[in-house]
Amino acid sequence: MAAYRCLRCARLLLVFISSWYVVASSEETTQGHDRVSVADNPQTAADTAKQPLEERRWEATQVDKAVPGDAAAAAHKQDFPVPDSVLTPTPQLNDEFKEELVIRPLHSGDIYASFQFRTVWETDFTRGSKVSHYRLFPKSLGQVISKFSVQELHISFTQGYWRTMQWGQPYHPSPPGAELWVWFQDTVTDVDATWKELTNVLSGIFCASLNFIDSTNTVQPSASFKPLGIANGTDHRFLRYATLPREIVCTENLTPWKKLLPCGSKAGLAVLLKSEKLFHSSFHSQAVHIRPVCQDQQCKTMSLELRQTLNVVFDLHTSGQGKREWSLFKMFSRTLTEACPLAASSKIYIDITDNPQEEQFELSPATPLLSQAVVLGDRRTFSVYDLTQQVTFGTVRSLNVLIRWKSTEGDMLRPLLHAERYVAGYGLQTGEIHTLMYNNHPFRSFPVLLLDSVPWYLRLYIHTLTVTSKGKENKPSYIHYEPSKDRVRPHLLEMLVQLPPHSVTEITVQFERALLKWTEYTPDPNHGFYVGSSVISALVPSTVAMNTNITEEQPLFSTFFPCKEESSYFVRVYTEPLLVNLPTPDFSMPYNVICLTCTVVAVGYGSLYNLLTRSFQIEEPNPGLAKRIANIIRKMRGVPPL
Amino acid sequence: MATAEVERRRGQLAALSIAAVVIIVGVPLWWKTTETYRAWLPVSQIRELAKLQLQLSADVEVVFARGTVTPEQQKKVPLTKTQEEDHAVDEGTTLKYRYETKYRTATIMEEDALNKPAAAEADLALHMLSESPCGSLVIYVIPESSSLLHEDVKVYVGQRRTALLRVVAQMRTAKTFEQLLDRLQPHIIQVLRMMSFSRADITAALSDRVRFHPGSKESVADSMRAFKSSPGYEITFSLLNPDPKSHRLHWDIEGAAQTYIQPLLMKMSPVANFSIDSQTLHYAMLGVNPRYDSSRSAYTLNADSLAHVINPVEARLGSNAASSNPVLNFLLYVPDSHHSPLYIQDHHKQEVYNVDSSYGPEAEFPVDININMAKVMGIFLAQLRLLLGVQSSPPPPGFLVAPCGSTGLADWELDRLMWSRSVENIATATTTITSLAQLLDQIGNIVINDNIAEQVSNAVTSLQLAVAELDAGNLGFALQFSKEAILASEKAFFDPSLLHLLYFPDDQKFAIYIPLFLPMCVPIMLSLLKIASEARQKRREKQAKKD
């Protein structure tokens, strides 16, 4: 049995190695991109061969980058051409489902768990052919895609804010609230109407208030959001981007999201997704990404890829009475007993990069499988639990991964890029938005693309826009600004800014607060109005040299220096959403005004009316009090009055 | 004293003129500025439509084959007769059925066709000769000696719009042509009831409008089974796999839908638009536990408990996100390995909905199972016909109905469906339009925009056209117009702009008006009252003086 597994493993290795060769050569020819980062190299295989006694075994894995980053999104179009192919392993069946869970212990003591479920369906839904028979792919989403001619769809719901400085970069960045961006196919004639209808349908599918997306919060970014899958053109007329920073994410959004999985929450990793634990966390984000991908390296046929991701950060340190220890059961109140039977692969990865000699924490049950991957510009090592193997579950037939910390030391590498934003100023008339972008790289500068979508009721004074780094003015090389129209569309500001090494770049712009009509205020206007996060897309220089494989078939003179041009990775950073107070009237005022005006009118009118209609006569002087009393007595006596 | 009198008169005049200004200028101004926009609606036409009077006309051709009429009788033909029948459903709805019957003798080509050896062939040959329009019928009267039909078969109902009627002994004794027709008449009526509209169909179609008198339990169930008329239907096939760990199910739904369902839907395309899709649901559990029946060593499920099965599954079926048409869900449940084989126990009979899954206990899981689509689709197709409202009442004795071909639907069945659908659409659209008119009439706050008025008049026009086409016997056009009427009326009824000012409460209106109106109107009222009382007093004084 063991021999068989070894054999299989070796075969796996072979497959991946050969695929990696092809990837590398294709990258060479297309001056390609960094979408697929294959982490294995023959050296590790050699290691396995050389050290059969060692318990740990290296497994070749292909870890797709968390955000399937694409170069063009990050920077100028000419510099980074859009990739025309996305590689996926060839599926034997028509469709294929994979699930995985990555767990990363964070230096703050929190635990970051990232689920990813991926369904690839070999079908061509673009060319008008009606797709209607579904197996693993959820029918509801498939119908939406074919009805609205959607090329790519990315939707995320997030509760909480990702603290980049404490937690590092997430695998799947997302802004607080709801975010939706969609590329439509170029056959769509009325994109705005389709977009409106699509948001309404999606709001029904995900039980979210996406129906509040309208033209006042929708923008068409010209450079920031490029297609992540196969795309013929990148005409941003077919792109729509909207965020709802106010959206609260809760169980009612999770349930429909889980329903899209082939196994539901009945088997596989999804049994861990219990809402009472997931929403008792510091950060929760769930997303759905749909895009067309290539089926193989030749890219002759297309597949439709659905990625469902769920990221959650648990604060176990505070709830665990200071004991730094966690397990699957403690996090999710469930343990794993089986993989989803429909899944082609079902794995748990645990990031043990900071713990090579087990001096920091102890992992049990120990797993012999190890894997390496370059994620977010860093070479990480993972312990792998393969749920499709019965051995993983041991004798108790359930898997409860447990980490016990031994020491609390350890530094986190500061993230190379992070950003923050705040509103400055006083009073309710004007204000100033400050956006700070930090480049923590010691010696390299890199360009970032900033996208700001500000609602119309903050009237930006674009002439006050300043970009300064290290006390000097930093002139953006590309600015795309679309002014707002009241009640019609928001401001859109996109800039390509070069961040000098080890610096803070500050962008400020002043604004004036508009006075809304009284029906336009939210039910709780004194809470303030949200302004969505800024989006910073960048190609950040990698800290590791990507290409260390020197056995590749290449001219010798070209392979000495390992560093290549592509040795940078794509990140997208979201800033905090802003909460801005607008001048808020007293809402009982209209009625007060009505009453007051009417009273004034009535008083004026009354006196005028009296003047006009009454006749005035000189009245005889009033008889004195004594005389009146005397008269009453006289009346009683029957005597004529005085 | 005189000056005081003059002053008093002046005051009265001032009060009167202020009142006049308020009434002549103020009230119209207030009226105009607070008016809600209400576009003109064709109310009188809607009222006319509310009293539904429909006339259904069908063209019937009775063709006498050689040997059925004597030469003497033959002189009378061709002949056209009209037959009318009144059907008062209730006081607001009256129907009139009109059959325009044309009698003629068969042409030579038709004679040739009728001499074919089998009825089905004759049917096809007659169809090739002349295509009868939608809604019409041709009845061929064939001699008793004809070999087309079996001896005990009186009437053969073909796949198209033709029927073969065999002359019975009593008809042959008829002397004159009129006598022959009289004796033929009951049989023809029977054929018409079968192949064209019948009272029962039309009453069922009007169930929306007319209070339904439930007859037997069976008929209630039958009438509730068919879906309401709609411009389109979404048909979804779901394969429920409760146990993907042990069964890996494969079904060729794409091919099966193409082979079995698509022909029927193509045929029914004049009635509605259809779309087909399918999905596989894993871990879809039955809501009930089947009982183990040791006598048969199988699990049984009572037919009554099937209702409890639907609810847990329905949550996962998902509604159609992309359209608002009704969804017809067809479920195929494959029992899990622990509850296999599974039987459904009915009152009358024991039905087996089981997928062949013969594997030994030593089989390695998951087991690949290929589902026999022909078996499944047979059941689905029969159910689909019922759900879409194709009635299949048992034929009267002596009738032989040709088996429906690959399309699964005979032409006359489609006609019957179109008759009842047209009537149903017209009834629904009139109900919608009249209730909308009533609602708008009752609630004065509702704004009626021009687009709503336009939809309403479109609906009314389409309704009138549909009624006229029914009258003229153009079934296809009638159905088309009735569908348009339904679309337009629903669009008008569900327009969101109707809701805007629907619930503006009266107390709030008063709260806004009172601060202004009370102090302004009270003095005017008082002075008017005073003037009136003074005038009355003066008159009384005058009267007294006269006396």
Image (cartoon, coloured by chain):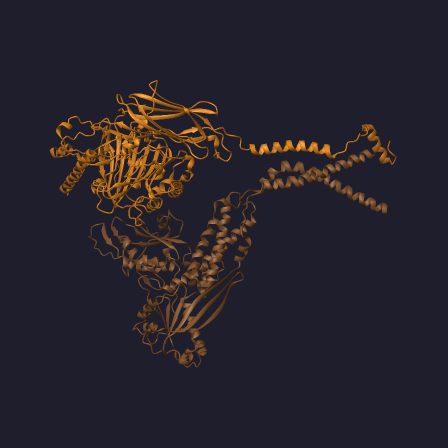
Chain colours: A orange, B brown
Between residue A591 and residue B276, name the one nearer to us: B276
Name the spot of residue B427 as percent of width and height, x first: 48, 58
Res. B214 in view:
no
Name the spot of residue A171 as percent of width and height, x first: 29, 33
B160, above or below B1, in the image: below
What residue appears at the point 79 percent right and 31 percent down from the top-left corner? A617
Name the spot of residue A502 as percent of width and height, x first: 29, 21
Image quarter of residue A446: top left
Between residue B160 and residue B240, name the one nearer to us: B160
**Quadrant in the picture for the N terminus of chain B:** top right
What residue appears at the point 62 percent right and 40 percent down from the top-left corner? B29
Q: Is residue B339 left or right of residue B216?
A: left
Between residue B260 and residue B1, name the one nearer to us: B1
A420, above or below B23, in the image: above
Q: Is residue A438 left or right of residue A580?
A: left
Q: Is residue B460 left or right of residue B368?
A: right
